[in-house]
Image: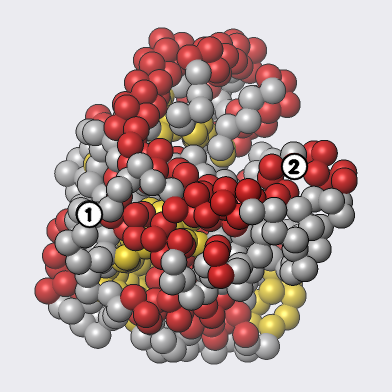
Amino acid sequence: MGMKQFDQTRAPLLEALREYRAARVVPFDVPGHKQGRGNPELTAFLGRACLEADVNSSKPLDNLCHPVSVIKEAEALAAQAFGAANAFFMVNGTTSAVQSMVLSVCKRGDEIILPRNVHRSVIGALVLCGATPVYVNPQTDARLGISLGMSVKDVKEAIEKHPNAKAVLVNNPTYYGICSDIISITRMAHDKGMTVLADEAHGTHFYFGGDMPVSAMAAGADMASVSMHKSGGSLTQSSLLITGPRVNEGHVRQIIGLTQTTSGSYLLMASLDISRKNLALNGREIFERVLSLAQYARDEIGEIGDYYAYAREIVNGDTVYDFDQTKLSVHTLDIGLAGVEVYDILRDEYGIQVEFGDVANILAYVSVGDRERDIERLVSALAEIRRRYKRSKSGMMRMEYLNPQVAATPQEAFYAEKRSVPVEQSEGEICAESVMCYPPGIPILAPGERITREIIDYIRYMKEKGGSLTGPEDLSIERLNVLKGDRPCI
């Protein structure tokens, strides 16, 4: 990028699309709907402007696989806005960004140090490349029933035991807003020549808001996957992969090309360009407002009784190094309801859709699009649920995290010969697929892990409580695929 200062008020891709529309080009290329004319119902539903912008790569509009003009410029502006050396527009979601990070540093047999409470996309990347996970088991907050961050001491130990590991992956933050000490972890990893990867699916605002936890790029990490569509305002499935100065840009682009579509959606890319401009210009006040909305909600929920909307008071300087206060995480067990039950009641009886519910918590995603009256509606619904449904909390499951017993790499297990067994009879077997509650999409079981009685009980409990379990071949989650022969490979 050199010393050239870019103008963050510009949105090169948006400008190119406007010019293209004004030029009234006759399209004898794909897509076949030809600016919406070929699909009237879709055009009526989404609007003509939307369909007219759903175009194909061409010389004036550049090409995502090999950007040389407007996309390249838009990516350079994004890199500058995020304090990165390079930025890549991702149109297969943050899953694709996470997988590109892992695939760009790990090949078959390489070790990667990571917390076990990673998103399913990380496990998917290990299935694809054949790397061996070295899990740093996160500690759990027994009261809240949530996984915390990685302890610096545990990461140091993992690095010392596995000096040939290629990379360390850090969640920044977790789904619940919990941050590890990414600055110390990055320093330790770099001292041993390891690459640092950050899953920042839930941390776009760290780059723009005031009084936020440190962002991966500011902490010196090498690569970060940033979900612009979550807190940054872009369209669903649009994301950024950003990289630091130690990372080879051309290599990363080649890796992205292995899995990313060659028909990049201009709707998604334009939304990234416009959202980056908005955040660069207005991010500070946008996230100041989000913080104050989330704090208002926490204060109001605190008044109800029994619920606990936690924030920075849970910071302990290590496994909870910092907390993202835009996250409205609410502990529900003291009213005798699992988070997933509160989640269902809010949706079914109050018309309120929160982000997710697990064993003991719900998470409401607060963003720039929210209004005070929406928060008030959520708070009054929670108060009413407590009044109508409160019961004894005896018999409620607490634990959120189960230490895995890794018996094979995810790739070996996923591609091994397997047989299908009923979940209830699977104890002691080695799982050959993933099982998770989605959201948050953190695997309860990953391929290559031994199935324990606690895991079976957890799966049964989540099914009883109405949690949405995903991952196995059997959509009813009655059976699991396990390894045919019990051959531990690790």
- Secondary-structure class at tag 2: helix
The residue at which mark 2 appears reads as 48
Crowding at mark 1 (Cα within 10 Å: few <14, some 14-19, many 20+): few
Residue farthest along the front direction in this orientation: 23
* Image quadrant assignment for residue 109: bottom left
How many callouts does the rendering have? 2
Q: Is residue 45 above or below residue 383?
A: below
Residue 320 at what x, y percent from top left? Answer: 26, 44
Assign the N terminus to one quadrant of the image. Answer: bottom left
For the point 22% across and 33% down, which residue is it? 211
- Secondary-structure class at tag 1: loop
- Along the polypeptide, which appears first: circle 1 or circle 2? 1
Residue 142 at what x, y percent from top left? Answer: 37, 41
* Image quadrant assignment for residue 232: top left
Asked whether, in this view, residue 3 is left or right of residue 234, the answer is left
Assign the C terminus to one quadrant of the image. Answer: bottom left
* Image quadrant assignment for residue 403: bottom left
Which of 390/244 is in front?
Answer: 244
Residue 454 in sight in this render? no
Q: By what rule are the colours in the image chosen? A: secondary structure
Residue 240 at what x, y percent from top left? Answer: 43, 58
Which of 71/237 is in front?
Answer: 71
For the point 73% across and 26% down, which residue is it? 348
The residue at which mark 1 appears reads as 5
Residue 316 at what x, y percent from top left? Answer: 20, 40
Crowding at mark 2 (Cα within 10 Å: few <14, some 14-19, many 20+): some
Residue 328 in sight in this render? yes
For the point 20% across and 66% down, which residue is it? 2
What is the three-letter code of the residue carrying label 2?
A: Arg
- For marks 1 and 2, give the CA distance: 36 Å
